[in-house]
Image (spheres, helix red, strand yellow):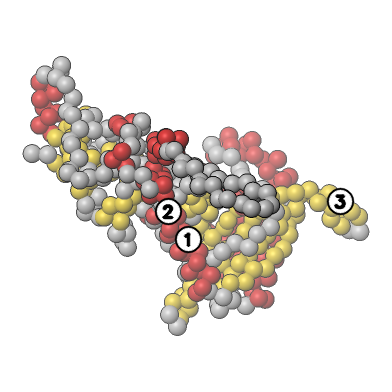
Amino acid sequence: MPTSITVPAIGESISEALIARWLKPVGASVERDEPLVELETDKVTVEIPAPVAGILSRQSAPQGATVAIGQAIGEIDAAASSLSQAAPNAPAVAPAPAPPGAPPPAVPSARAEAVRAGVDLDTVAGSGRGGRILKEDVQRVVASQTSSATPTPPTPTPVTQGPVPPVRVQEPQVGREEVVVMTPLRRRVAERLLAAQQTTASLTTFNEVDMSAVYRLRAAHKDRFQEVHGVKLGFMSFFVKAAVAALKEFRGLNAEVREESVVYKNYYNVGVAVGGGKGLVVPVIRDADRLGFAAIEKEIGRLAARARDSKLTLEDLGGGTFTISNGGIYGSMLSTPILNPPQTGILGLHNIVERPVVIDGKVEVRPVMYLALTYDHRLVDGREAVQFLVRVKQCIEAPDRLLLEI
């Protein structure tokens, strides 16, 4: 009897997922616990392992389909695996036929193009893997229909005087728009960003920081640091340490508004916004106040790698108390970051540019970064926000403060 592949409970409040991709085709042999299908939710991307060893005999939910928790999305035939081992030359199990009336397999962009152009997918021959219909296949059908259609010439109208105006025929436009269904992750990001704007009293304050001291410190010790700790000394660890030092002084930025109360947090879980394989995500460095520079750099590297490979878990993403967003790695000079509720503060970093500054009455060229702090004005006053940013500036411009905790 075939064993069903079901969507497991992935996390609290998650009720649906999207089939990002099947990692095995129908007819493939799979081992127990071997990754079988990749699911994308509004928070994470997870791989679902095979519940038993056997032959993947059915995929009842195609790539791009939205499925519910507990829904069966395929089947594994364990008996077929036993037969194939007994008879090595036996042919692979054929894909299970689609149920009557079911639409042919098509990627989401192809379905959207078919809806836009009014094309019946049953009339489209798929050129993708396993006969899957691609967007280009739909466009090919639209183009053939357009070219084969013979326009009816207009009936001439007698004119007694004046020139006959030229007849302009509107040519159909193919492929000028692409309709793509938003992924659960993108939908969730959109919802949270909109909610942040509507439910908080956000305000942003700015400052600039001279990066010269950090440059000198890194240049003097980066080789030995990597030799000893096996990780590069980056800028982010300095800002994480500086932010924690400032959060300890200005507790309102490490708190949250909960109904009619304020919850001040005596732990420092710093989220670091990174671009992942599926979009912007904010993995969390837990208990950052207890970590040294090397431990912070290693944790940043681990989380960034998991983000790029879409391997982040709910545990990696939850529980943050403050966020740092580094738009400077993409070239941003200045921005106003959006709060990550229920947090009350987010620190925005930007690119480092050599600028003329006045030092002891003399103009010098220094590497300067603009900082931005967005805060929830319901809980944090402007004075506190400005002083927080000044404290971060002091720690970066004199990093020995971080070592001496002053």
How far apart, in angstroms, are the residues tagged by discs 2 and 1?
A: 10 Å
Residue at figure coordinates x 61%, y 67% from the top left: 374
Label pair 2/1, CB-CB below 8 angstroms: yes
State the mark number for residue 364. Answer: 3
- The outermost residue toward the front is 160
- Relative to residue 121, is residue 392 drawn left or right? right
x and y, in percent, of residue 272 in the image: 53, 54
How far from the left and from the top, in percent, is residue 281?
48, 53
Which residue carries the number 2 mark? Answer: 182
On residue 190, the disc is: 1
- Residue type at the position of mark 1: Ala
Badge 1, how many Cα within 10 Å: few under 14, some, many 20+? few
Q: CA distance from mark 3 to mark 1?
A: 43 Å
Q: Residue at x 50, y 52 (%)?
A: 280
Among the 4 quarters of the image, the one containing residue 43 = bottom left
Mark whose residue sits in front, 2 or 1: 2
